[in-house]
């Protein structure tokens, strides 16, 4: 992975129509974005579809990226996640039970390799997540990593949807207050 | 936000987390495109939660994925984030043209209201003969960390001008490139010197792994970086950028500070000898 500063420069070049820069940007970010989308969609054909849409959007919108507001990879991941979640909401046939046991472990355990490269923002966020009630923390992590809806979370956690909604919102408030504005 | 109320804040938070149903997401996305205040809320939540992706293990996509993406973008130029409705400006740019451009930008802004994430950009054509201080309103400091682009046009054979601009009223720098003599002139207009900082000009080309420094600009009103070590194709195809660096320039030889402006000589055609 290139540094954030290098990615900013690549995005600036992409915004000016630099095709070679776009290919380098793809090479530097494809595995992260594919990992994120595949985890949500769990089907390679769907993840491939979202990858195409995501990078087309990046090609068309690189000029809208603002390094004052987010890091390049976070901006790109947000595009990919939103596409993936939009798709998964429309594809009810994607089973929520598949791989659930494996994902449960993964969602609760930070990848130790990534942990060494944690940014200060991530450390703060994880510290705040660590202060959440365990069940709510798992709820937030399942939602973020696996793209589960309130209904899917309700089924997984064996709670009414309204309870899940309240828990999610309380957890988000706690995170916001812990991080400060 | 309160626990159970459906407010813009809860909608933004759950949109970013990803727990909304399809119809709620569609509603959020419509708001995102039309309501800058909502877009800011979403941006705040992206900033709070966005780093979580760091713990997702990378997975290599199959090679066909790139082939499909490449096929879909080839021949499709990226959409410039901002383009004035009528970029043609008479060659004799004068004070009245600046006013006209400002007014056009105002119209454009109305048309683009809601696209809050887009930084200000001006598409402008200026001739070198028009470097008249009278045409420029009072200096305005460019906001740091704002990427701004200006698309340039050929004004004389082999001669190109880019206006690097951070707001509707005042160009920050005007970059003139003469391909034949491989020289450039950077005139500081409204970019104010910043204490303890220097502006540095860079040439970015896919021929080089990293941006190449063209030296400091903005210390004096005019800077004349040389492009002698680059061939005309590189000069005409490159992206030019200004970053804000520690005083005296980047200590590392590559940009370390925020990128303030970028511009590309899109219409450049290398002149005959």
Image: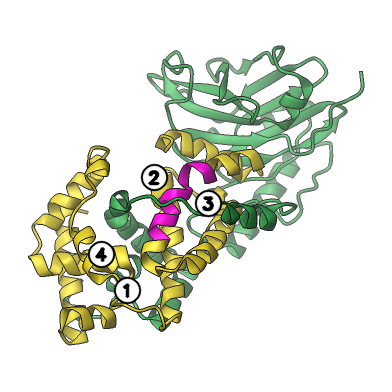
Chain colours: A yellow, B green
Task: Please indicate, yes or no, whether residue B133 appears anywhere in the rendered image.
Answer: yes
State the residue position of label 2: A71
Chain of the residue where label 4 is placed in the rendered structure: A
Chain of the residue where label 2 is placed in the rendered structure: A
Q: Are marks 3 and 2 in contact (CB under 8 Å)?
A: no
Task: Give residue B11's mark.
Answer: 1
Looking at the image, tell me whether mark 2 or mark 4 is earlier in sequence order. Answer: 2
State the residue position of label 3: A64
Q: Assess disc 3: are there few (<14), some (14-19) or many (≥20) residues with their C-alpha within 10 Å of its C-alpha.
A: many
When the figure is inspected, residue B214 is found, relative to residue A127, above or below; the finding is above
Q: Find residue A31 and report its horizontal and vertical position in percent.
A: 44, 49
Query: In this picture, which residue range is highlighted in magenta?
Result: A26-37
Q: Is residue B44 left or right of residue B201?
A: left
Q: How far is the residue under mark 3 from the one under mark 1?
A: 23 Å
Task: Give residue B214's mark.
Answer: none
Q: Find residue A136 and report its horizontal and vertical position in percent.
A: 14, 69
Q: Find residue A166 and report its horizontal and vertical position in percent.
A: 17, 78
Which callout, 1 or 4, points to the residue nearer the camera?
Answer: 4
Which callout, 2 or 4, points to the residue nearer the camera?
Answer: 4
Q: Residue at x 27, y 38 (%)?
A: A117
Task: Please indicate, yes or no, whether residue B140 appears anywhere in the rendered image.
Answer: no
Tell if the residue under mark 2 belongs to the same chain as the one under mark 1.
no
Q: How far is the residue under mark 2 from the one under mark 4?
A: 26 Å
Q: How far is the residue under mark 2 from the one under mark 1?
A: 23 Å
């Amino acid at each position: 992975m290139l540094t954030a500063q290098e990615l900013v420069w690549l995005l600036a070049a992409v915004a000016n129509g630099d095709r070679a820069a776009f290919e380098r940007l793809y090479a530097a970010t494809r595995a992260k974005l594919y990992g994120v989308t595949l985890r949500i969609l769990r089907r390679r054909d769907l993840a491939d579809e979202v990858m195409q849409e995501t990078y087309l959007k990046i090609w068309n919108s690189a000029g809208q990226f603002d390094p004052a507001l987010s890091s390049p990879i976070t901006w790109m991941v947000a595009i990919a996640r939103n596409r993936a979640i939009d798709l998964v909401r429309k594809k009810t046939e994607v089973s929520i039970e598949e791989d659930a046991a494996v994902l449960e472990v993964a969602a609760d355990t930070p990848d130790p390799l990534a942990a060494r490269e944690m940014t200060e923002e991530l450390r703060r966020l994880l510290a705040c997540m660590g202060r959440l009630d365990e069940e709510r923390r798992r709820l937030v992590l399942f939602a973020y990593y696996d793209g589960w809806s309130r209904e899917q979370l309700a089924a997984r956690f064996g709670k009414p949807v309204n309870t899940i909604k309240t828990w999610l919102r309380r957890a988000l408030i706690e995170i916001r207050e812990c991080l400060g504005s | 936000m309160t626990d159970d109320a459906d407010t813009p804040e809860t909608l933004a938070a759950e949109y970013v987390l990803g727990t909304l149903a399809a119809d709620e997401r569609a509603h959020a996305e419509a708001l995102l495109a039309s309501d800058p205040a909502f877009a800011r809320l979403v941006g705040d939540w992206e900033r709070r939660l966005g780093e979580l992706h760091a713990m997702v293990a990378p997975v290599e996509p199959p090679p066909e994925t790139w082939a499909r993406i490449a096929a879909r973008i080839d021949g499709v130029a990226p959409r410039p984030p901002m383009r004035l409705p009528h970029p043609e400006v008479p060659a004799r740019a004068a004070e009245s043209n600046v006013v006209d451009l400002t007014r056009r930008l105002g119209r454009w802004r109305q048309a683009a209201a809601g696209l809050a994430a887009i930084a200000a950009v001006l598409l402008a054509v200026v001739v070198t003969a028009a470097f008249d201080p009278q045409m420029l309103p009072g200096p305005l400091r460019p906001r740091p960390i704002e990427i701004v682009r200006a698309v340039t046009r050929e004004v004389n054979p082999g001669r190109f001008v880019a206006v690097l601009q951070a707001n509707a009223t005042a160009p920050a720098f005007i970059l003139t490139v003469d391909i034949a003599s491989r020289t450039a002139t950077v005139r500081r207009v409204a970019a104010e010197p910043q204490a303890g900082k220097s502006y540095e000009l860079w040439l970015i080309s896919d021929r080089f792994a990293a941006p190449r420094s063209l030296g400091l600009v903005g210390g004096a009103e005019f800077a004349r970086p040389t492009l002698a070590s680059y061939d005309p194709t590189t000069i005409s195809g490159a992206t030019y950028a200004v970053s804000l660096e520690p005083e005296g320039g980047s200590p590392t030889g590559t940009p370390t500070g925020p990128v303030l402006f970028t511009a590309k000589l899109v219409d450049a055609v290398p002149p005959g000898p």
